[in-house]
Amino acid sequence: MTEPTAASSAEAGTAAEATAAREAASSPEATAAPEAPDTVLEVRDLTVDLRGAAVQPGLVREVSFRVRRGGATALIGESGCGKTMTAMSLLGLLPREVRVSGGSAVLEGTDLLGLSPRQLARARGRRIGAVFQEPMSTLDPTMTVGDQIGESRRIHLRESRSAARVRARELLELVGIPNAAARLRAYPHELSGGMQQRVGIAAAIACDPPLLIADEPTTALDVTIQAEILDLLRELRREQDLAVLLVTHDLGVVADFCDEVVVMYAGGVAETAGTDELFGTPRHPYTSALIASVPTGAEPFSRLTSLPGRVPAAGSFPAGCRFAARCPFATDDCTRTDVYHDLATEPTRCLRVVRGEITPEAAA
Ligand SMILES: Nc1ncnc2c1ncn2[C@@H]1O[C@H](COP(=O)(O)OP(=O)(O)O)[C@@H](O)[C@H]1O
Ligand code: SF4
Ligand SMILES: [Mg+2]
């Protein structure tokens, strides 16, 4: 199975720097912070920067969240808010010019951010499965479906070719591919987009990882197929106890599939909440704007209709609250206060909600 192109650049580009910094963290297991028993992944204060920039834009700043066993946590926000950078940090697939500069991401006792690129490459597939918007970014067009699903088991679990093939067939059945025995011999281009994504999911979970990271896995698919893929992921959560970190800009998908939500804005977390709580009583004006921009609750947003302006680009983030220029509730205090540091322990990074000056209802 091939990785997205970022994989090779990340590994080549980071070799010297990351080996020195990360392999020095000799035993990530020993230093990892304790997690709640049902927590599979605990991310704390993840910070991602550009390498060598004189002034750091803070592509991702102090992002914290967790994913529970069998649960699903969503990362939502408009395009450019840092969702993919966050996900790619956990997979060790950041572009060459970008690096993790702080925080921890503990997966079942191991801090992923303390692993060397080589160790992270081993964890991908074995302990973390990944699916992306374009299934062909992870599927190898030159290999049959059966070979690429089986390859993961042969490499990570040292399984024999024949045993891997048997499991590949079972996995195709598990992800709902009809006539699995014949499909093992098919090449990815012979399948529809929905079937390719199912194969991508089968390959991602081939070694029974506890965590699946899915970055916009249904965005390229039509609505019916989208629902089928979400049903499949729901079944895998229930039956395999799979934990899912779902990156999406589609609030309908969040409401339908996730139990916890991390709302990202301009590289930081605006608010973290349970799904019902988030939709019922949003605690950040940005969350309210996201919800207001989806009148039917089922359509994805790419830009907000309820608020003017755009997400500020990395490198031109304003001081204080990064949402201030678009926020109908902004006061001078908002641009003077570093909400990321000053409100680090609050469930919302909105100064005025924390102070009780505006209520979630008023913000909504
Ligand atoms: N290779 C890169 N180098 C520098 N900045 C980048 C790179 N790729 C993305 N960015 C910037 O990082 C920020 C976060 O991007 P991304 O994580 O892709 O957002 P999202 O997935 O939420 O749409 C954006 O401001 C984007 O312009
Ligand atoms: S801190 Fe101020 S500008 Fe930022 S979201 Fe809250 S009210 Fe709006
Ligand atoms: Mg993205």
Image (cartoon, rainbow, N blue to C red):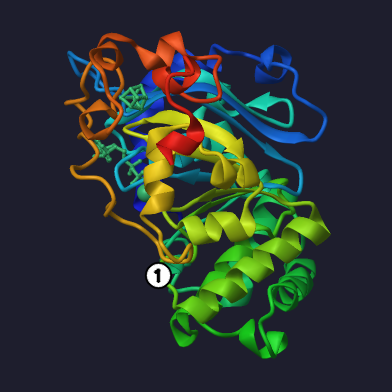
Regarding residue 200, the answer to whether it shows in the image is: yes
Say if 68 sits above or below 195 in the image: above
Residue at left 20%, top 21%? 318
Say which residue label 1 marks.
Answer: 220
Is 260 placed left or right of 181 in the picture? left
Is 158 placed left or right of 256 in the picture? right
Residue at left 34%, top 47%? 78
Residue 151 in picture, x, y percent from top left: 63, 62
Residue 81 in picture, x, y percent from top left: 34, 39
Is 244 placed left or right of 361 in the picture? right
Residue 155 in picture, x, y percent from top left: 65, 53
Label 1 CB, ligand 3: below 8 Å? no
Q: Quadrant of the C terminus?
A: top left
Residue at left 69%, top 60%? 206
Q: Foreground: 113 or 117? A: 113
* Picture quadrant of residue 307: top left
Which amino acid type corresponds to the residue marked 1 in the rendered image?
Ala
Residue 355 in picture, x, y percent from top left: 47, 14
Is 224 placed left or right of 316 in the picture? right
Counting labels gives: 1
Q: Residues within 10 Å of mark 1 (few under 14, many from 20)?
A: some
* Picture quadrant of residue 15: top left
Regarding residue 77, the answer to whether it shows in the image is: no
Q: Foreground: 101 or 339? A: 339
**Kind of element beneath mark 1:** loop
Q: Foreground: 326 or 63? A: 326
Say if 307 sits above or below 193 in the image: above
